[in-house]
Amino acid sequence: MSWKSSLDMYEEAYTLHYQERKLAEARDLYDKIIEHFPDSDEAGYAVVQIGKIDAQSITRTTPSSRSRPTRKAVTTAVILSCVACIGVLAGGGALFFFVRQNQRTVQQLKTERESTRRQIVAVKLLLTAVGKAGTGHPESAIQIVREVKTLTPGDKTPYIIAADIYQHAGKYDRAIQEYQDLGAAFPLAEFVGDKIAMLKKEQARHRDSLTKAQTPPRLRKPNIPAPVQHQRMRSPRNGQSSGEVDSSLLIVDSVDFF
């Protein structure tokens, strides 16, 4: 006969025990419950029932079937029941702990193997993204990096690579946003603030260079040199030596480009 659960087995054993009074068969079934379902509640109940059956067996072995069981027999039955109960519970507990520990170890190994597989795939995808960005396809590269973010949510690398791709493409706002997202996902990443500050400075320089490149030459403000001083030498007047310079002839002009 096959049973679907420990509860089915216990119900069958209970029927044999109390209704049909087949103690030997009931005891065998209680033993099977303990053997096959050591961590179930029914196993604990079965231990108690086995103790009762053993106590009844001891009582029946006395010389007079009508006489009451002696105190010694009852005490012995109780002790045997307690010992059996402790042994089964201890053994069942040890077995349950061993099984649970093995299950955790197997699950941990599976998790580590899956994590390693994801990391390998992520590295390959990131290399592909960097290659596409280097060949002038930044949008395709960003799409790949987004897939990596989903694949390895606990990794900072996709955010950094995405920011670098945007930076080289001149999209500083998007690069800054990537570092802001990284800071939100990883609050302990202290380098985020420095990276954002560096990107903002580079963005300002980039805007200045674009503004100068787009301004027509005639509207640019030139670099005005220092005033030029001219000395004009003329023939000396009456009463002046040839080495003297007439102060009235010293003219200081400012070169004006406007």
Image (cartoon, grey):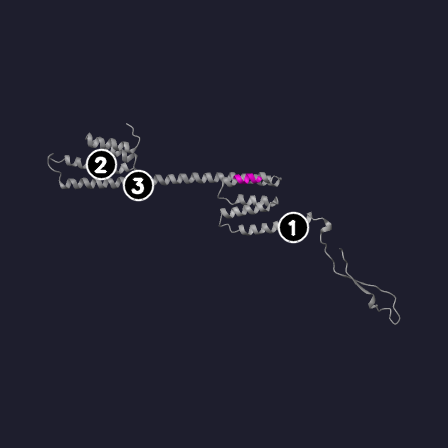
Where residue 194 appears, as percent x and y from the top left, is 55, 52
In the shown orientation, is residue 121 left or right of residue 35?
right
Q: Which residue is drawn at the image coordinates 52% and 40% (left, top)?
A: 148
Q: Marks 2 and 1, Cα distance to the nearest angstrom?
A: 90 Å
Residue type, numbered disc 1 = Asp
Crowdedness near tag 2: few (<14), some (14–19) or many (≥20) residues, C-alpha within 10 Å: some
Where residue 137 appears, as percent x and y from the top left, is 61, 39
The magenta stretch spans which residues? Answer: 141-147
The answer to whether one can see residue 207 in this image is yes
State the residue position of label 3.
93
Where residue 44 appears, as percent x and y from the top left, is 26, 38
Q: Earlier in the sequence, mark 3 or mark 2?
A: 2
Disc 2 is placed on an element classified as helix
- Asked if residue 64 is positioned above or below residue 200 in the image, the reply reads above
Disc 3 is placed on an element classified as helix
| Residue 56, quarter of picture | top left
- Asked if residue 85 is positioned above or below residue 254 in the image, the reply reads above
Q: Who is closer to the viewer here, 137 or 51?
A: 137
In the shown orientation, is residue 28 left or right of residue 97?
left
Q: Who is closer to the viewer here, 201 or 112?
A: 201
| Residue 2, quarter of picture | top left
Crowdedness near tag 3: few (<14), some (14–19) or many (≥20) residues, C-alpha within 10 Å: some
Q: Which residue is drawn at the image coordinates 22% and 41% (left, top)?
A: 82
State the residue position of label 2.
49
Q: Residue 4 colored magenta?
A: no
Where residue 216 appears, as percent x and y from the top left, is 71, 48
The answer to whether one can see residue 131 in this image is no
Q: Which residue is drawn at the image coordinates 67% and 49% (left, top)?
A: 211
Q: Marks 3 and 2, Cα distance to the nearest angstrom?
A: 19 Å
